[in-house]
Image (spheres, helix red, strand yellow):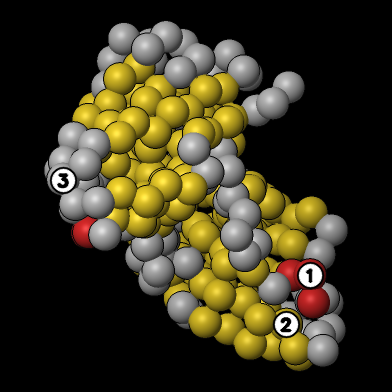
Amino acid sequence: NAGVTQTPKFQVLKTGQSMTLQCAQDMNHNSMYWYRQDPGMGLRLIYYSASEGTTDKGEVPNGYNVSRLNKREFSLRLESAAPSQTSVYFCASTLKPPDTQYFGPGTRLTVL
Amino acid sequence: GENVEQHPSTLSVQEGDSAVIKCTYSDSASNYFPWYKQELGKRPQLIIDIRSNVGEKKDQRIAVTLNKTAKHFSLHITETQPEDSAVYFCAAPGGSARQLTFGSGTQLTVLP
């Protein structure tokens, strides 16, 4: 079992560029999440998918979109990157909330 | 939604001493309280959790206590070791999908 995987590990963008962060889990989990982590601010929820076919906004959704492609995959898209989106992004999944969330290794994104 | 406050933001202890981190939450319906440990450059990983039907749970040197009346829970680490140095996050569920809201984190440093 690979658990939760994310690509890419690192990315540098220029302001206005777009990109998609990929996340996949092989644990047959129902719920998946995208968080961003900034110094001193903990983990803030961007979007989540409670089950296949559904997505909902979290605490900080502005500037992002998501797609739950199937039960395994949940992607996060930045349509027009801004320096304020410089952060570390984590994907996570759980079988049935509230329960243990398993995190991916993270993507470190820098927007210049 | 859920509001989780975590204190202190930084904590330094001598090796062998105990460390205590406290969190308060706002949603009285919350029934699951996990603690995550994040080492530098790594993903958060669950170290212990507690459900609202018990007041305390122990796992070797770590324990979590819950006071539902006061709406707070605490992480206790005894006989601290250098490998305990990390950032610790508490969390509590809220919202219709019981998604987790994380505290802002505590940087624990164990001094040799």
Whether pointer 1 and pointer 2 mark residues with C-beta atoms closer than 8 Å, the reply is: yes
Q: Is residue A2 visible?
A: yes
Which numbered marker is on residue A16? 3
Q: Residues within 10 Å of mark 1 (few under 14, many from 20)?
A: few
Amino acid beneath label 1: Glu
Circle 3 residues within 10 Å: few <14, some 14–19, many ≥20: few
What's the distance in space between the residues labelled 3 and 1, CA to CA? 41 Å
Q: Which numbered circle lies on residue A94?
A: none
- Residue B25 seen in the current view: no
| Residue mark closest to the camera, 3 vs 1 | 3
| Chain of residue at mark 3 | A
Q: Secondary structure at mark 3?
A: loop
Residue denoted by label 2: B110
Q: Position of residue B72 (x, y in %)?
A: 45, 63
Q: Chain of mark 1?
A: B
Which callout, 1 or 2, points at the residue further toward the start of the chain?
1
**Which residue in the structure is indicated by mark 1?**
B83
